[in-house]
Image (cartoon, grey):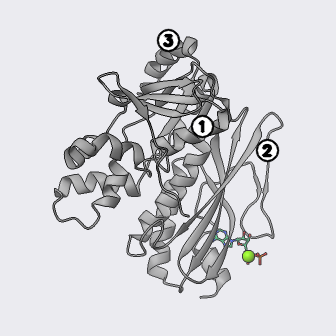
Amino acid sequence: MNEFSLIERYFTHLTPKRPDVLLGIGDDAASLFVPSDMQLLVSTDTLVAGVHFLSEWEPYDIAYRAVMVNVSDIAAMGASPCWVLLALTIPDCNEVWLKKFAEGFQKACQQFNLALVGGDTTKGPLSMTLTIHGLAKQPICRSGAQVGDVIYVSGELGAAALGVSLLNSIEVDDADRCVMMSKLLHPSPRTDLGELLQAYATSAIDISDGLSADLNHICVKSSVGATVELDAVPVHRLVNKYQGVNAIEFAMKGGDDYELCFTIPAHDEPQFLLDLALKRLKCYRIGKITASGVLSARRMDGVEMPLKAEGYSHF
Ligand code: ADP
Ligand code: MG
């Protein structure tokens, strides 16, 4: 099979058809309709075998997760995902692998009415770069946090990182491993919070590198500090089970959950909580934005200490 029949067989008709795709796969460039009252958000992420995923993983999971981590970046801007490009590098034309990869890609895109509108297919060590496009009236940036804002996270933290750390451990209950691996391989980007972010958030980020590292990005960009109430951080029950006294630290450092961290003005909090309940969603208030310029953590006994912005970094 050559490159063109491969694209035609596995990718051309893979994802939902959208009326705003004026030209999709098959030309030199895609042409996309952007409504005049919307901003176009663009983001790209590369996933390399051996770094971001293992080549032994199910191709379905590799593709599914690749879409989800890209959707998460759009969700973190309070935007809705619309279009994606896939630059795929594969070592050979393994049709069994490609079929499963395409299935995972399709399943993930369907959930967001996300259309695959182009890409590139090359031969080489397994890796992929996705470029995702989303639309928002007004994107929520990392730089908007204000002193006095309250800090929220959208879900429990640490289970995906636990899956990574216990990948080869034999001392893990099978049912627990299943939960961790599902958090790691099938993250659910929080596009469901888009409207609430649009209405209330002053800043937002997706937690891909770990809460402390990502909250630090908000602080640096916004020129503010933050105090996190350690007992308010939602730690996944399995992190408590397997990390014991280190659970909180583990949950705050661990990336890969793709929950959101965002700030809202304190005076908007009551209305925000009403709207959140109306949507049957749950978020956790974990602290406050301060004027200190640094990150700190307050223990249950009231003692405050500096919080290191630790998380994953490639270099
Ligand atoms: P060109 O030579 O102009 O770069 P290609 O031969 O690389 O074009 O690609 C042909 C068409 O197929 C283009 O529209 C391109 O966007 C699309 N395409 C190539 N690879 C993929 C892929 N992996 N997924 C989706 N679309 C792809
Ligand atoms: Mg090309």
Distance in Å between CA atoms under marks 1 and 2: 28 Å
Q: Which badge, 1 or 2, comes first in the chain's sequence?
A: 2
Which quarter is ligand 1 in? bottom right
Quarter holding residue 315: bottom right
State whether residue 140 appears in this view: no
Mark earlier in primary sequence (2, 3):
2
Q: Which residue is mark 3?
A: 270
**Mark 2 or 3: the one toward you:** 3
Is residue 169 shown above or below 139?
below
Q: Is residue 100 left or right of residue 249?
A: right
- The kind of residue on which mark 3 rests is Pro
In this rendering, does residue 13 appear at all? yes
- Residue 34, disc: 2
**Image point (29%, 22%), residue name:** 301
Residue drawn at x 15%, y 61% is 171
Say the numbered circle drawn on residue 199: none
